[in-house]
Image: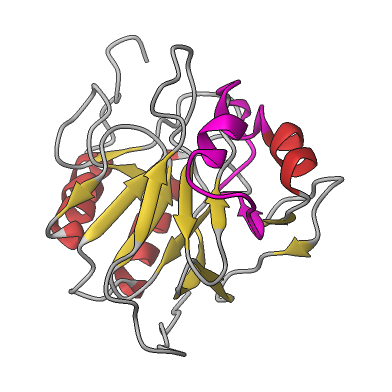
Amino acid sequence: MNTTLKRWRPLSSDMEVHTVTADAETFTCNAYLVVGEVTTLVDAGAYGGVVGAIRNHVDSIDRVVLTHQHGDHVAELDTVLDAFDADLLAYGDHPRRDHALADGDQIRIGDDEFAVVYTPGHADDHVSFVSERALFSGDVVVHDDGAFDDGSFGRTDYAGQSRERLIESIRDLLETMDDDVSEMYAGHGSVFEGDVRAVVERALERAERREPKYPEE
């Protein structure tokens, strides 16, 4: 896989992103509302108050894009789609999917163009979204998650997951990413601003050790 990221339109000066699951008290992924020309929700999460949180910022959304369909990323998907009549874009099959995503596609999120990068290992249908300045990495790479700080990788100890395939996916991300990517929005942990490439490289180094991510693995 060798995706060349193309700039279709000039980048906006600032990307307006809100973590609309921030107030959740139960386990959920980070769901990100990206406001702009194509107002987009990246993952729906498992927070029962997500529709109200979205409406604190906008009256409508154009689309929901999924990194993958694990329960903590899609539990509130139907609720969101019903509330906003938004299009659903996903790599994996879903009964409400309007558009299928494929590796190498270019899609608009907010005001910027993002490359779709197929990044399985943690989930067979996992994709990440990369622009010239930002990365929505889902669960393939996160900044901090309790196992590692400043560069961690998705767990691969459950049935159907693969550490080897995850390592390939992280390498594919690095091939796609520009050195200037400075914003990282992962499925769990904190939003990171800075040298995103260095964070992803540290995650790759840790994954390549083939050691258990968690002691109970």
Name the residue rendered at 42%, 85% in the picture. 4
Say above or below: 142 vs 145.
below
Extreme residue in the right direction: 95
Say above or below: 135 vs 142.
below
Expressed as whole percent of the image width and height from the top left, the position of residue 68 reads 59, 44
Expressed as whole percent of the image width and height from the top left, the position of residue 196 reads 20, 58
Q: Taking 198 as reference, is 9 left or right?
A: right
Question: Which quadrant of the rendered structure holds the C terminus?
Answer: top left
Q: Taking 139 as reference, is 178 left or right?
A: left
Expressed as whole percent of the image width and height from the top left, the position of residue 11 reads 34, 81
Task: Give the colour scheme of this rendering.
Answer: secondary structure
Q: Is 101 a magenta residue? A: no
Expressed as whole percent of the image width and height from the top left, the position of residue 211 reads 25, 29
- Name the one closer to the observer, 126 or 206: 126
Say above or below: 156 vs 64.
above
Say above or below: 115 vs 129.
below
Q: Taking 149 as reference, is 35 left or right?
A: right
Q: Is 60 a magenta residue? A: yes
Q: Total label count?
A: 0
Name the residue rendered at 84%, 48% in the picture. 96
Name the residue rendered at 68%, 55% in the picture. 90
Q: Quadrant of residue 103?
A: bottom right
Name the residue rendered at 54%, 40% in the picture. 54
Q: Taking 188 as reference, is 77 left or right?
A: right
- Name the one closer to the observer, 84 or 87: 84
Magenta part of the chain: 47-76
